[in-house]
Image: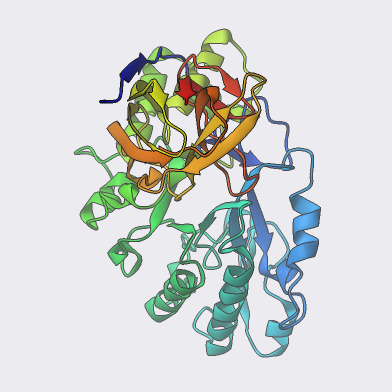
Amino acid sequence: MAESKMKTAFTAAPGALDNPLKGWCTYDTEEIYLPYSMVFTYVSWRELEPEEGKYRFAEWEQKVWETPSAKGKYIVLRVYIDYPTLPLGLPEWLQKKGVTTTKYAQFGGGESPDYANPILIAAMERLLYALGERYDKHPRIAFLQVGLLGHWGEWHTYPRAELFAPEATQIRVIDAYRKAFPNKKVMARYPQGYVGKQAWLGFHDDYFPEDTGDEGDAKNWYFLYNINRSGRAENWKRSVIGGEMIPHKGSNALKWLGSAKDFAFTLKRAEEAHFSWIGPYSPALENPPTPAFTERCHRMVRRMGYQYRLLELLCPSTVAVGKPCALTLTGTNEGVAPFYYPWAVELALLNPQSQVIAQQPLRKTDLRTWLPGSFTLCDTVKWQVPPGRYTLALGILSPLTGKPAIRFANTVKVTQGWSHLTTLQLT
């Protein structure tokens, strides 16, 4: 006898505002006014390796990751050597080995190391391999930015271009990041030179949205201008794009989301660049002045990155215990980017008390392939449970908690992260 197929249609609803690895990614040290899932952290090399080969990763994690704003959140990380106005981030032991620095006055002043020094280059590689050993598979780390070189680790020493790292150093650093972090998504600031040849890299625009575009009047430092001319316009399909709103607290977020016209410009820039997140300065650090400002912030979050809405499920209404249960689930990604990690997509059976009785991974499903637009999930599972009536539920599991973490833009009931799909009779 042929299986009796049942069709279930799902109702759309506004998406979650704190789904993981998208939205606002703010400084962890300031008051945050809007829902968020990530925090942005700068850390100096000196703090991580105060003595040669003796890394203080655990101490740094305890200090930063457990603050009230960061606790339980995902981390975006950038390591720096030179941060204008802050103490030099170069470890003292490298200075004793002969790595010199040059003082500069721009941006409040600081010291720029000799990036051509082979001792420094080899030490940066060792640091990156140590970072990779600890964080490449660490579930708290969302993304890494290629730092180390230039002011703020932002890969420039403007206007003192002569202080910046030569191309040979840039190549060594990029290659070391690639080797150290095969499982994490890494972002670079400027898609130029050797960096612009890397199909695996993501990018961050730290002057959003003013200098993000690529219209006819775009300058040669504009973000999308360089993305497109370096041939990296498709990188967003493989690695994450994000960046910082122009960091003048108290004005820019209010400006760029403050009127309908400016917000339309800002949203268009995020869509064109396929942004997944904005930070560390972002609208989440501004106390919302009006309901309209809050509504625009929410629209930005729901458009950035991924937003999955389920459309329809086709599966048997009744299936025998231990027999194949084939299902087809269709949906749409309403965001502008995919999800970038192979988090497990699983089905669960819930009893009448909404307890999970059984789970089954959908091994044919790769979340990373759900690009903007429609997607279809087709798979077959077998349930080895006592006969009875169950709720069939769907979950996308975070490696950080081992529990479902991504919510769908639907009105479905959710129990402990599991989204209820339909009822299933096991005989």
- The answer to whether residue 372 is seen in the rendering is no
Q: Nearer the viewer, residue 357 or 227?
A: 357
The quarter holding residue 30 reads top right
Q: Position of residue 165 (x, y in %)?
A: 46, 74
Q: Residue at x 58, y 22 (%)?
A: 414
Name the spot of residue 77 as percent of width and height, x first: 60, 55
Q: Judge from the rendering whether residue 221 lies leftward or rightward of residue 300; answer left or right.
A: left
Q: Which of 42 and 389 lies nearest the eye of the viewer? A: 389
Residue 118 visible, this angle: yes
- 59 in relation to 228, above or below: below
222 on left or right of 362: left
Return the residue found at the far front.
Answer: 1
Image: 317 above or below 114? above
User: Which residue does the image show at 41% across and 14% down from the upper left?
Assistant: 12
Q: Residue furthest top?
A: 291
At a point 42% along the width and 32% down the height, the residue shown is 304
Q: Residue at x 43, y 67 (%)?
A: 161
The quarter of the displayed image where residue 328 is located: top left
